[in-house]
Every structure is written in structure tokens, then in C-alpha cells.
Amino acid sequence: MENNNSRRKAMKKIVEGAAAVALTGAVASRLEAADTIMGAALKGRINHSVCRWCYDSIDLDALCRAAKNIGLQSIELLTVEEFETVKKHDLTCAMVSGIGKDYGITKGWNKKENHDGLEEWYKYLIDETSKAGFKNLICFSGNREKKLNDEDGLKNCARGLKKIMKYAEKKKVTIVMELLNSRVDHADYMCDHTDWGVELCKSIDSDNFKLLYDIYHMQIMEGDIIRRIRDNHKYIAHYHTGGVPGRHEIDETQEIYYPAIMSAIAETGFKGFVAQEFIPIRADKLASLKQGVNICDI
């Protein structure tokens, strides 16, 4: 009888121990899953974002949920009307859209006749960006249109943008001009080389005016990406990705090796955002987005 009691006690301890181990394992698995959902599986050297327009076939709420699962902190190039949706999901908008009914990529700050309208439009966008607690607002040079040389266009951009810089500084918003290629996607666009953009930054001379360095566009226009980033990083507020050629997935199907570029960006001490801006061609667009984030998460 005494032996049976001893065996029962021993078996009880074994069962309790096994249950404790199983429970610990289950809790650990759930915590690991929760960490992955919150993005803790990413390494933290790069702040990740995604451009909304590349996934416009996906409902914004659904894209927000997917972004959180992947580990993104931002969905960008949003209009004012879309701000509340990302905020509801505890995401930010790392770059606010500057395109409106009358102004955009082709019609920008390089023409003096655009300045009054742009000043009014951008003061509205600066207000809304500031109220939302966001930091960066995109802008564009506009096209050359064959009758405007780069030197005069730069002077016009500087003159016009200086009209809003004190307001942007007061509201703690950075105005960011995007570098785009004029060879493939945006024929005649003026801000199509890093050197031109850097000269504009020097001319405006404000910490609240920077460049959006689009790696896809600048690979097409000039290459030498890592050296240009290292030489000019103090003028860069934001980065975009994209596969060359084609602007699709940034994997082994294209010519840019993004891990090396991301390492170079991190080594400059950059604390801003890198946004995926490729157009996915695979059926599972969100799987392509996750792959792009993982490639850039050095």
C-alpha cells in the first residue's frame, strides 16, 4: 500500500512537470507569435514603410493589418482623408502625399507661375500633416518642358519653396523633394540627378528641406548608389526601393543588391524610413511585400 502511494506521488510530480513544460512551451510560442505580429522579428536597424499606391487594389484597412503583421511601422503617400485609417491601426505615415488636383510631379515648384497656388496648397498640407503628428511632406520640381534650363529651374524652386519654409519649420514638418528618373518613367522631370537636388538643398539652407532618394530612379539615372548616399546623406530624409529593370520585386530578378545599400544607409546613422515602392507582379502581392522588407532588414 505504501509503495502504491509512493508511485502515485511520483507519477503526479511527473505529470505536473510535463504539464508545466507544455504550458511554458505554449506560452513561449504565443509570445513569439505576438512578437512577430508586432514586428519584433525585424532587426531594428531600418524603419520600414510601404507606398500605398503600389497596393491600391487592397483595401487600406486590410493593408494596415498586413503591414502590422509584416512588421512595418508606416504606410505612406497617403492623402489627408486617409490619415485616420492608419492612425487607427497605430501606424504612421512616413511621407505625406503632395499631389493635388492642380499640382504634382509634372507641375511643380520650378515655374514661377505655380508659386502662389503651391504656397496655398502646401500650407494646407503642412497644417494637416502637423495636426496628424506626421513629419514629412513630399514635393516635386515639375518638368523642364524644353523651355526652362536647370539653373533657372533651381532658382525658381528655391525662390518658391522659401515662401513656405518658415511655416514648415514652425509646424515641425520637413518638405522633401523626390529624385525621379527622366529616362524611363518621368520624361523631362527636372529633379532627376542627386547633384541638382543637393544644390537645391544648399540654396534653401533649411534643416526642414531635404531629398527623397529613390534608389530605383537614381540607379536608372546615374548609378553609383552607395557612394552617392555616403557623400550626400545629410541632405536625404527618406528612401524608396524598386527593382531595376521594371520596378518590380527587389529580389534576384533584378540588378540592385539591396542588402549592401541598406547597410550603407544604416552606417550613415540614418534614423528615417525606407519605403518599399515596387509594383508587385506576383499573385500574392503581400508575400512580395514581406519578401522586400526582409531583404532590406539588414
Image: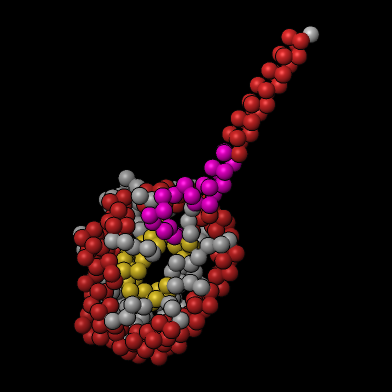
70 versus 171 height, above or below: above
Point 42% across, 86% down: residue: 167
Left or right: 283 with respect to 158? right
Which residue is most to the right?
A: 1
Residue 18: % across, % down: 63, 25
Point 55% across, 64% down: residue: 86
Residue 54: % across, % down: 45, 60
Q: Nearer the viewer, residue 230 or 143?
A: 230
Q: Can residue 35 be found in the magenta stretch?
A: yes
Residue 218 quadrant? bottom left
Residue 99 quadrant? bottom left
Q: Is residue 234 visible?
A: yes
Left or right: 75 with respect to 139? right
Point 21% across, 72% down: residue: 195
Q: How is the image coloured?
A: secondary structure
270 versus 69 height, above or below: below
If the image is split into quadrants, where does the N terminus sit? Answer: top right
Q: How many marks?
A: 0
Q: Nearer the viewer, residue 132 or 95?
A: 132
Q: Nearer the viewer, residue 46 or 86?
A: 46
Range of magenta residues: 28-50
Q: Is residue 146 visible?
A: no
Residue 248: % across, % down: 37, 54
Q: Can residue 95 be found in the magenta stretch?
A: no
Left or right: 170 with respect to 87? left
Which residue is most to the front?
A: 2
Point 32% across, 45% down: residue: 252
Q: Nearer the viewer, residue 270 or 252?
A: 270
Residue 53: % across, % down: 46, 63
